Image: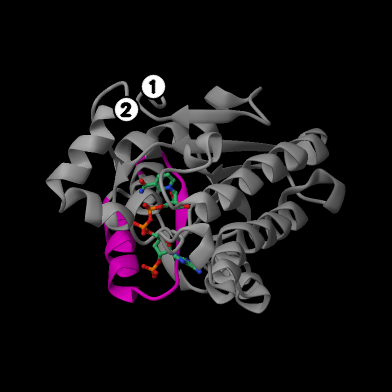
Amino acid sequence: MSGTLLVTGGSRGIGAATCRLAAERGFAVAVNYRDDEDAANEVVEEARARGAAACAVRGDVASEAEVERVFRESEEALGPLKALVNSAGIAGNGAPVAEFRAEVLERLLAVNVLGLQLCCREAVRRMSTRHGGRGGVIVNVSSMAATIGGRAFASDYAASKAAVDVFSQGLAKEVSGDGIRVNVVRPGMTFTDMTTRVKENPKLRERIEASIPMHRIAEADEIARPIVWLLSDEASFVSGAHLDASGGGFLV
Ligand SMILES: NC(=O)c1ccc[n+]([C@@H]2O[C@H](COP(=O)([O-])OP(=O)(O)OC[C@H]3O[C@@H](n4cnc5c(N)ncnc54)[C@H](OP(=O)(O)O)[C@@H]3O)[C@@H](O)[C@H]2O)c1
């Protein structure tokens, strides 16, 4: 694999694991982050240690101006964009619907849905053969939460990921004929900073593991591998797919 890959939320968790593996497979990697510059720089160093060109690019995906700058700076540093992984995402407030707060919902949707859509727009403008590009590939990171309305008090987050699933399906139909494959990976619960509270709470962890057919929570690498497979030519006829990396889904 070659060319420039931009990973939003590439500084930690699933995004960081994706950057490391994609670097090994030959991509030049632009590591987007919002706050944690040290974490982003560490991933850049790890990518370089694997022989890849890499750069860190700060930017909030919820801001249109920052998204435009992130794409511009990534290409200035590493060359034309070939691939995009949208991994940047946040959890909701963990609140029942009766306690929803508009500003929390607005931020959740701005990052998980609006931000992802703006990043896809920028990628399509660059990759689409209709716009003079050479084609490319997009992987959007959704969640198994979208398939069940979320675990307790996560309906807001689940709804944002259902939007990712449906948007990606429509986008795949729109651009697959213009040289761009678009797919979704839906992780089940995965050990990252987003799920620290599960790691630190043995009772909660046990309950969650009991609900997963494989009886365990994923490591970030186990989500990165299907993402990088979808980026590769091995998946050359795969577009519009929702790939569940979930240990078998949910036991109900
Ligand atoms: N972990 C799970 O169990 C799980 C399960 C299903 C789906 N997912 C999805 O997988 C994706 C990655 O999750 P994760 O667990 O790897 O999360 P994580 O460890 O919390 O990392 C989140 C990453 O996203 C970045 N980010 C957050 N908000 C951003 C914004 N507004 N603009 C740009 N970057 C932003 C963070 O950068 P900074 O550090 O700079 O803030 C960080 O690099 C998310 O879309 C999440 O919804 C996760």
Q: Quick one: 142 or 53, which is closer to the camera?
A: 142
Question: Which mark lies nearer to you, 2 or 1?
Answer: 2
Residue drawn 66% across and 78% down? Answer: 65
How many marks overall?
2
Residue drawn 45% across and 61% down? Answer: 90
Question: Helix, strand, or loop for circle 2?
Answer: loop
Residue 183 percent across, percent down from the top left: 61, 36
What is the three-letter code of the residue carrying label 2? Answer: Ile
Q: Which mark is residue 213?
A: none
Q: Quadrant where the C terminus lies?
A: top left
Is 90 positioned to the left or the right of 137 in the image? left
Q: Is residue 169 above or below residue 99?
A: above
What is the three-letter code of the residue carrying label 1? Answer: Gly
Q: Quick one: 24 or 20, which is closer to the camera?
A: 20
Residue drawn 23% across and 49% down? Answer: 198
- Residue 65 is one of the magenta-drawn residues: no
Question: Marks 2 and 1, how far apart in space?
Answer: 7 Å
Residue 197 percent across, percent down from the top left: 23, 56
Label whose residue precedes the other's in the sequence (2 or 1): 2
Residue 69 percent across, percent down from the top left: 62, 75
The residue singled out by tag 1 in the image is 248
Q: Check if mark 2's residue and mark 1's residue have beta carbons within 8 Å.
A: yes
**Within the displayed image, which quadrant is ligand 1 positioned in?**
bottom left
Q: Is residue 243 above or below residue 202?
A: above
* Quadrant assignment, res 71: bottom right
Question: Helix, strand, or loop for circle 1?
Answer: loop
Q: Which contiguous range is marked in magenta? A: 24-49
Residue 240 percent across, percent down from the top left: 68, 31
The residue singled out by tag 2 in the image is 212
